[in-house]
Image (cartoon, rainbow, N blue to C red):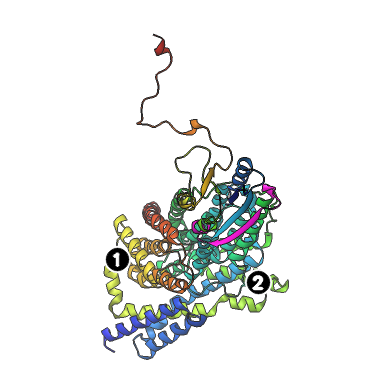
Amino acid sequence: MPSPLAETLAVLLLIATLGCAIVRPRGLPEAVVAVPAAGLLLVLGVLPLGQAGAEAGSLGPTIGFLAAVLVLANLCDRYGLFEAAGSWMAAGSRGRPVSLLALVFAAASVVTAVLSLDATVVLLTPVVFATVARLHLRTKPHVYACTHLANSASLLLPVSNLTNLLAFGASGLSFARFGATMALPWLAAIGVEWLVLRRFFASDLVGRGDAREVTPLPVPVFVTTVVGLTLAGFFVTSAFNVSPAFAALGGALVLAVPAVVRRRTTLQELAISIDLPFLAFVLALGLVVKAISLHGLGSAVAHLVPGGSGLGSLLVIAVVAAVLANVINNLPAALLLLPAVSGAGAGPVLAVLIGVNTGPNLTYVGSLATLLWRRILIRRGEELPISEFLRLGAITVPPVLVATTLALWISLRVMG
Amino acid sequence: MAPMHIVIWVVEGTWEGCVDAARRHFPSDSRFTLLHVTPLEVAEAADAATAGLFGRGFPGRKPHRRYDDIADEEASSLLAAAAARVGHPDAEVLSRRGRVEREVIHAVADGVDVLVVARDGDHARLGPKSLGHATRFVVDHAPCAVLLVWPDETPGIESIPTPKHGPPPPPPPHEWRG
């Protein structure tokens, strides 16, 4: 097939794949369009089998890693870790809203870094909401902090975000080196979010909740220990050139067996929490994007982003990545941009991550496409006052982008 | 003369001050209504964040209670606490959900004499800005009289910082003797 035709077909299939992922007609999994799309590209020879095999080979371990982390986070919830964290935050804050916000910041940053942004959005945020509401304080600052930090605090470790996992494979960095390089950008992002949110919500951080009746739940020792050991395992396995996915798998298994025996969860629930359709979607999306990259768009993207590790180049890369993530969601943006910069060393790869991870805070749903669709759905009912959330995004994302990129540049120079 | 109808806007963090001010300033035979509005956008932001994850919303989990259910429950308990503090057996409670400022304005549109509203934010000093977005809208648009109160102790006048480029401070007294 001639290249322009192949490229057009691949782009159309990408649009169909993303469209289905956003609209989810009849609640069908994203894979329903993504997998046939990838299959069609293979059958027509747009994506040669060899290239597809190589891409699947590099995505495979990443997808396995993701599955293990999803199961691990789900089991942490089943062992009551998030519920306990809610009680610690309530008791530790003594009902003071600013102290509570600081504890929410700490919890959301750590949960995002260690158990991924998914855990913060799906498992921690409801607990934070209930905790703040029960103290009879205003929930808005704390809930918005969770949704923001799920993105901007997902810079630290390869496990913190699926985009990081994708980059981790390509960057050639060890787990420890990735974490060490991203530590300063991670802290910078959290610091900027704190300064902005603390001021933005000053009028809502008011009053004193009655925390006298809150008893902090006991530390769930087993699950906390296993998560700690799993985290250590990420560093150790990587140091010995073993995929850290095995540490995640080990942690998930150690938690899963007693959980199933004591009926905290069921085998069926565990199997569902692996989320096979989503994993298939990631693989298929990776193949579709690969086909696009092969037929010209790859080199076009490569021209769009500079290759150097100077501060200016890193900033341009981060901004391009943030814009792209806002247009088409951060996952395809990362898949499209990472191959273009992976030859240029760790700096540009990590700058892409800064853009695709912190950029989605501009909209509150991850991308403009998702936002538009959500607006269409909601337009039928009452219109939601989301302008405040969009305003918060507009004043946090630019300073976060600049501060984290500057921190990355310093980190890279210090680390050599 | 018919008793006054007083609506007390109950907001987390500041409601006690409103209730106390209403008790202090209005006759005990007034008709008291306690109003709470749950904002729509908090639950929406929390729910919508999962939309950005594509489908990976931990499908195996039994759904937690919905944000709206938790909010309703806590709104009821807050209103019950406020009613107890009013100490008036006939105090009515009103729980709404929606755009906060608009719901409040609509709730006081008919036959209400006074709406009792608390200032927001840090109230250790006077100003410079003591009204959040919703409160400012309500104060600007309320179709009735508004009693605007400090949620706890009213800060002293000395809490306003002296302006840097304002008029010079009065000269010390000894210069006047001479």
Quadrant position of the C terminus of chain A in the picture: bottom left
Q: Is residue B18 rendered magenta in the image?
A: no
Horizontal and vertical percent position of residue A170: 40, 69
- Counting residues from the start of the chain, the first of labels 2 and 1 encountered is 2
Separation of residues labelled 2 and 1 (CA atoms): 44 Å
Mark sitting on residue B60: none
Name the subunit of mark 2.
A
Asked if labels 1 and 2 touch by Cβ distance under 8 angstroms, the answer is no
* Residue toward you, A16 or A136: A136
Name the subunit of mark 1.
A
Label 1: state its secondary structure.
loop
Mark sitting on residue A305: 1
Horizontal and vertical percent position of residue B113: 55, 49
> Which residue corresponds to the image point at 52% horizontal and 71% vertical from the top-left?
A66
Instruction: Check disc 2 and give the amino acid type.
Output: Ala
Horizontal and vertical percent position of residue A60: 48, 77
- Look at the image and tell me whether residue A339 can be seen: yes
> Which residue corresponds to the image point at 61% horizontal and 44% vertical from the top-left?
B22
Q: Which residues are magenta?
A: B84-103
- Look at the image and tell me whether residue A176 can be seen: no
Q: How many marks?
A: 2
**Image-quadrant location for residue A80:** bottom right
**Image-quadrant location for residue A299:** bottom left
* Residue toward you, A401 or A95: A95
A248 with respect to A383 (left or right): right
* Residue toward you, A137 or A189: A137
* Residue toward you, A323 or A406: A323
Quadrant position of the N terminus of chain A in the picture: bottom left
Mark sitting on residue A256: 2
Q: Is residue A257 above or below residue A83?
A: below
Instruction: Check disc 1 and give the amino acid type.
Output: Val
Which residue in the rendered view is the most extreme toward the bottom? Answer: A43
